[in-house]
Image: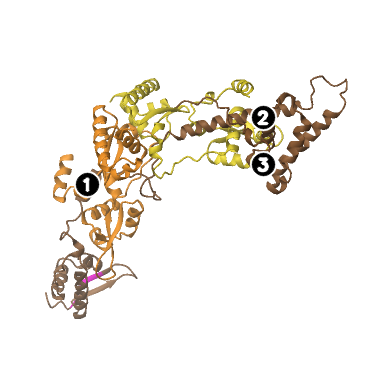
Chain colours: A orange, B yellow, C brown
Amino acid sequence: MKATRIVEAVLFASETPLAPAEIARASGDLSAKEVEQAIAELCQEYEEEDRAFQIYPLGDGYQILSRPEYAPYLERFDSVTRTNKLSRAALETLAIIAYRQPVSRLDIEDLRGVNAAGVLRNLQERGLIEVVDRAEGLGRPLLYGTTGRFLDHFGLRSLEDLPRPEELQIALRSGE
Amino acid sequence: MKATRIVEAVLFASETPLAPAEIARASGDLSAKEVEQAIAELCQEYEEEDRAFQIYPLGDGYQILSRPEYAPYLERFDSVTRTNKLSRAALETLAIIAYRQPVSRLDIEDLRGVNAAGVLRNLQERGLIEVVDRAEGLGRPLLYGTTGRFLDHFGLRSLEDLPRPEELQIALRSGE
Amino acid sequence: MRLPAPSRSRAVEADDRFIVELERFQGPLDLLLHLIRSQDIDIFDIPIAEITEQFVRLIEGVEERLSLEEAGEFLEMAATLVRIKAQMLLPRRDDLLEDEDPRSELVRRLLEYEFFREMAYTLADAEADRARHRNKGYIEPRRPPDVSELPLELSLDDFLAVAVSLPAPPVRTPHRAPVRPVTVDEKVDLWLRALKEKARVPFEWFMRRWRTRIHAVMSFLAALELAKRGSIRLRQERHFGTLWVYRGEGDEDS
């Protein structure tokens, strides 16, 4: 069986991103390097054939997803799982954590001026943040950071992909 | 946006079979007939490109599934959705319900010569059968029928796909 | 996906004709059919005496091997067979209809059951074939699903819009920030300056302005010092209500 097709079958069947090494588990004679090559080949095929889906790098893995331009068509379906929205408070907290990680609850509360316990629990339940460390000093408070799922959600490959604070202003203004 | 691509995006995003009329809901100017045409086109494309997946008719809808020849590669991944096989008792009971629906528990027990309560409960829990009616007469017993999930589980397009009793009788006599 | 052609090959296992585990059978009809088919007996002319004897022998001790209900099903069939056997032995009476064979009802049941038994094999084949076609999401997510596993409805733009509106950090890593030393005297000046502009200031509001704890502590100490000197007055309308800071009467410093 051709490596490209095996990789395609695995990517198709998976609901979450898979790292090349994981995909290679499908067959005894398939290396992570070959998987990478197969993925590059498939990407090109999908591009040329103008498929409605493409392979996207997410976190340290890859996932087949429908192309963003088809999102409006998919929104009309019930069978496509409904989404849930984050509150403004949760968003602010997530932003603070994304840019300041590792960061303690107290730091977040200082910045936002309100209690953050509930919001942090919520974000943790959604798998967007996690405890990454403990600070030195009094009480050794927990330090929070963002998760792989956070990257997945925004289609980011790493935290480096987040616009830097300086760039933000410009990026947002040009988007308006 | 081309109809074929919209249909592809919808089929790709859905985890359950979708009927052409449902798929047509994706876009204001898409008819069920056009969806059928698009599906036929996509089937041919996938065939020609030797994709690891194909569009299969299931019940009154369509779903993208991986091709059976890739099953051994996918088996190596721990899976939640691994189908557990039905017992012989369950299969016999399903056969009776499929052919005789709507049918009561008593009729099933008469046919198989054994109690059917446990099997019926199990099949109902798995969503393969459902109560479709109540019979007239004493106690107004529940009448069972098969569900859309039943068709999906066995890869059937409709109940018509099952062999007709006459075909099987002949087979039985000449086969023995 | 094509439905496989009905398979008929597995209905009968002929090799274990008389060594029979009852547990393997789907009840008395299944066992009876096995006896008939495995011995190539014409189902339309069952030697009822012989079959009854075999059947009764096979289910000997059934009460100990199966549940009460399952055993009852086999025993009931044994009784039916014995009754048919007795009817067969009775001399035929002329007033009976010709085709009223005592076995006919049993044959009808057996054939009907056999049909569904065959269908079960057809369904098993179809099931196996379908199972080789994998749905999307067949491969389990790496992270075990959470309670609220719903995908988020949140775009990067929305996220960044919030990120940009956040107050700028005083330093790059606030939790490791070196604390600038601050004295009570500095805070005393700040309190007095604030009270020059306003007649009263909520105590809480004033404490909040400090990003690090040392500032808050010094502010608090400064307030205590000023209250002692009589430069400020503290007033609280009710328990846990806002604590207001007023200019004091003996405001000799300003």
Q: Tell me if label 3 and label 1 are in contact, CB under 8 Å.
A: no
* Looking at the image, residue C130 lies above or below residue C159: above
Pinpoint residue C24: horizontal percent, then vertical percent. 63, 40
Which residue position holds label 3? C22
Residue occupying the point 59% across, 41% down: B121
> Secondary structure under badge 3?
helix
Q: Mark 2 or mark 3, which is nearer the start of the sequence?
A: 3
Q: Where is residue C220 in the image (x, y as percent from the top left)?
A: 22, 73
Instruction: Using the image, name the chain to which the residue with label 3 belongs.
Output: C
Q: What residue type is labelled 1?
A: Ala
Residue drawn 17% across and 56% down? C168
Tell me whether circle 3 and circle 2 mark residues in contact (CB < 8 Å): no
Query: Are the numbered discs 3 and 1 placed on the same chain, yes or no?
Result: yes
Task: Give the residue number, with chain letter if any, for mark 2.
Answer: C37
> For the residues carrying marks 3 and 1, which lies nearer the camera in this image?
3
Q: How far apart are marks 3 and 2 (CA)?
A: 16 Å
Which residue type carries mark 2? Answer: Arg
Badge 2 sits on which subunit?
C
**What's the CA distance linking mark 2 and mark 1?**
77 Å
Q: Looking at the image, is C244 positioned above or below residue C50?
A: below
Instruction: Say which of C25 and B110 sits in front.
Output: C25
Q: In this view, does A172 lie to the left or right of B171?
A: left
Which residue position holds label 1?
C161
Q: Earlier in the sequence, mark 2 or mark 1?
A: 2
Q: In the rendering, at what x and y percent does residue A96 appear?
A: 23, 55
Question: Residue at (32%, 48%) from the top-left corner?
Answer: A86
Query: Which label belongs to residue A17?
Result: none
Q: Give the range drawn in magenta.
A: C244-249
Q: What count of labels does the image hold?
A: 3
